[in-house]
């Protein structure tokens, strides 16, 4: 029932233009959100690693490696998606 309501409202809602969507959030806000999300994700990794290993230095090392590797992986993930035409207009 809830999903039907969501689907109906999305189907009847007018599409927003790029300009309307662009004006809803500034680029700096997106950058700050991405950084804050990366911080939250890394803290999560460090805490889980600490709980599993019992060693904070090892957990921090894992967190440091994780933040660097995930940024690199995300970069290549985005570059690959640029070649995929699905979902583009």
Image (cartoon, rainbow, N blue to C red):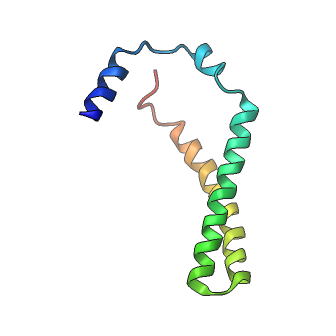
Rendered image quadrant of residue 49: bottom right
Q: Position of residue 46 (x, y in %)?
A: 65, 72
Q: Position of residue 71 (x, y in %)?
A: 66, 55
Counting the numbered discs, the total is: 0
Instruction: Name, please, the residue furthest toward the left.
Output: 1
Is residue 89 placed above or below 4 in the rendered structure?
above
Q: Nearer the viewer, residue 73 or 48?
A: 48
Task: Decide if residue 64 is on the left or right side of residue 5.
Answer: right
Task: Decide if residue 32 is on the left or right side of residue 75.
Answer: right
Q: Nearer the viewer, residue 26 or 68?
A: 26
Task: Decide if residue 53 is on the left or right side of residue 30.
Answer: left
Q: Nearer the viewer, residue 59 or 51?
A: 51
Residue drawn at (68%, 62%) of the image: 67
Rendered image quadrant of residue 20: top right
Residue drawn at (62%, 59%) of the image: 41
Locate the N terminus by quadrant.
Answer: top left
Q: Position of residue 59 (x, y in %)?
A: 67, 78
Residue drawn at (76%, 34%) of the image: 28
Q: Position of residue 53 (x, y in %)?
A: 60, 86
Residue drawn at (34%, 14%) of the image: 12
Is residue 78 placed above or below 63 in the rendered structure?
above
């Amino acid at each position: 029932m809830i999903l039907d309501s969501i689907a109906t409202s999305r189907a009847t809602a007018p599409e927003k233009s790029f300009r309307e969507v662009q004006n809803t959030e500034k680029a700096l806000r997106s950058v700050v959100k991405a950084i804050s999300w990366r911080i939250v994700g890394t803290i999560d990794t460090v805490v889980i690693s600490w709980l599993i290993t019992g060693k904070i230095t090892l957990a921090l090392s894992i967190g440091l490696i994780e933040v660097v590797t995930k940024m690199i992986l995300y970069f290549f993930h985005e570059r690959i998606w640029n070649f995929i035409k699905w979902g583009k207009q």
